[in-house]
Image (spheres, rainbow, N blue to C red):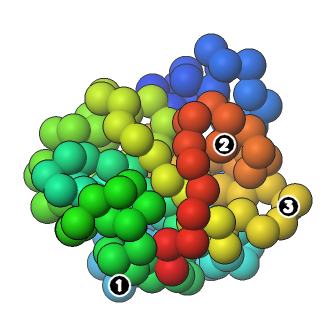
Amino acid sequence: MAKATPATRALDKAGIPYSLHAYAYDPDAPRIGLQAAEALGVGPDRVLKTLMAAVDGKPVCLLVASDREVSMKRVAAAFGGKSAAMLKPPEAERLTGYHVGGISPLGQKRTVPTLIDSGSLDTDEEIHVNGGGRGLQIRLRPADLVAVLQARTAALA
């Protein structure tokens, strides 16, 4: 399957090995990450959802396993801020260049600080992140994801 997106181009440019996995995206699914995991036949802990938030008004990108919830108090603390809140969908789309349900942490229109939940990376197994389109996931090694994003890790859930 050859589907180039800004996310795949970012990985290609960095020389990071990955594989693409398409699935039938369900826009009515109550939790898109869980639906993606089920459709791909992998555990929900292996599919990281991309969340766009703001800490003290500054945008940040968060990655957490699709079966976990983020604590905004922990997010604020991890960035040395006082408060954190999720971005509204139109703001997340404008900032990333992707549509909600297809927001990848890779190849975003504007680079923002990225934090990955450490509890979501406690394995050597490959993980999935959104590939930059609804119904498209990228599978790669956790260490490669951290490196290419220049991300930090912290307990967010």
Amino acid at circle 1? Pro
Q: Is 55 placed left or right of 49 in the picture? A: left
Answer left or right for 72 relative to 46: left
In terms of sequence position, does the residue under pointer 1 or pointer 2 come before the other?
Answer: 1
Location of residue 109 by image quarter: top left
* Above/below status of 83 relative to 54: below
Q: To which residue does mark 1 refer?
A: 30
Real-space Cα separation, disc 3 to disc 2, in angstroms: 12 Å
- Crowdedness of circle 3 by 10 Å Cα count: few (<14), some, many (20+)? few
Quarter of the image that includes the N terminus? top right
Give the camera-side residue of 92 and 151.
Answer: 151
Mark 3 lies on residue: 125
Position of residue 149 relative to residue 137, above or below, is above
Q: Nearer the viewer, residue 104 or 60?
A: 60
Hey, which quadrant is residue 153 in on the image? bottom right
- Callout 2: SS: helix
Q: Residue at x 57, y 29 (%)?
A: 8
The percent coordinates of residue 7 (x first, y second) are 51, 32
Q: Amino acid at mark 2?
A: Leu
Q: Is residue 122 visible?
A: yes
The kind of secondary structure element at disc 3 is: loop
SS at mark 1 in the image: loop
Q: Amino acid at mark 3?
A: Glu
CB atoms of marks 3 and 1 within 8 Å: no
Q: Crowdedness of circle 1 by 10 Å Cα count: few (<14), some, many (20+)? A: few
Give the residue at the far right of this rendering.
Answer: 124
Q: How many marks?
A: 3
Residue of label 2: 145
Residue neighbourhood size for the residue with mark 2, other residues' Cα within 10 Å, grouped as few (<14), some (14–19), many (≥20): many
Identify the residue at horizontal 57%, vertical 63% (top origin). 154
Disc on the earlier residue, 3 or 2: 3
